[in-house]
Amino acid sequence: MKREESFNPGYYGPRGFNAMCDYLVGEFSGVLKKRAVDDRVIAGRGSAAFIQAVLVAELGVRLIMDDMRLSETKARQLMEHSKVLGELVQPEIER
């Protein structure tokens, strides 16, 4: 979580990032708040930052694995290499 990089989940782009965050917050925010008491990684930056930096990336990899029928390693590579494409075809929308 200390690395400064784009949290863009590959070809899902900023729009996909927002959709994934919304889903993950709805599903896991309560659990993460409880875990933050004992987990210093979550507590260090908060549950929202943990969702953005860790869980969105993991969800993106799992979705790419499923979409493209790839191994985890290949899906991570594709996610990294398709970030520019994601920014072009799935830009952030006004809320």
Image (cartoon, rainbow, N blue to C red):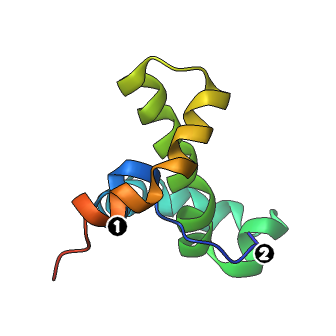
For the C terminus, the quadrant is bottom left
For label 1, count other residues whose C-alpha is less than 10 Å away and answer few (under 14), some (14-19) or many (20+): many
Indicate whether 41 appears above or below 58. Answer: below
SS for callout 1 = helix
Is 27 positioned to the left or the right of 90 in the image? right
Identify which residue is drawn at 61% across, 29% down.
74
The residue that disc 1 covers is: 14
Residue type pointed to by label 2: Lys
Query: In this view of the protein, which residue sits in the foreground, 56 or 38?
Result: 56
Residue found farthest to the top? 69
SS for callout 2 = loop
Rounded to the nearest whole Å, what is the CA distance between mark 1 and mark 2? 20 Å
Among numbered discs 1 and 2, the one appearing first in the sequence: 2
Identify which residue is drawn at 23% across, 58% down.
89
Q: Position of residue 67 (x, y in %)?
A: 36, 26
Query: In this view of the protein, which residue sits in the foreground, 19 or 87?
Result: 87
| Any part of residue 74 in sight | yes
Q: Position of residue 79 (x, y in %)?
A: 51, 45
Is 71 positioned to the left or the right of 14 in the image? right
Identify which residue is drawn at 64% across, 72% down.
5
Q: Position of residue 88 (x, y in %)?
A: 28, 64
Is 79 positioned to the left or the right of 88 in the image? right
| Any part of residue 26 in sight | no
Q: Nearer the viewer, mark 1 or mark 2?
A: 1
The residue that disc 2 covers is: 2
Residue type pointed to by label 1: Pro
Q: Position of residue 38 (x, y in %)?
A: 81, 64
Identify which residue is drawn at 74% across, 75% down.
43
Indicate whether 83 appears above or below 94. Answer: above
Residue found farthest to the left? 94
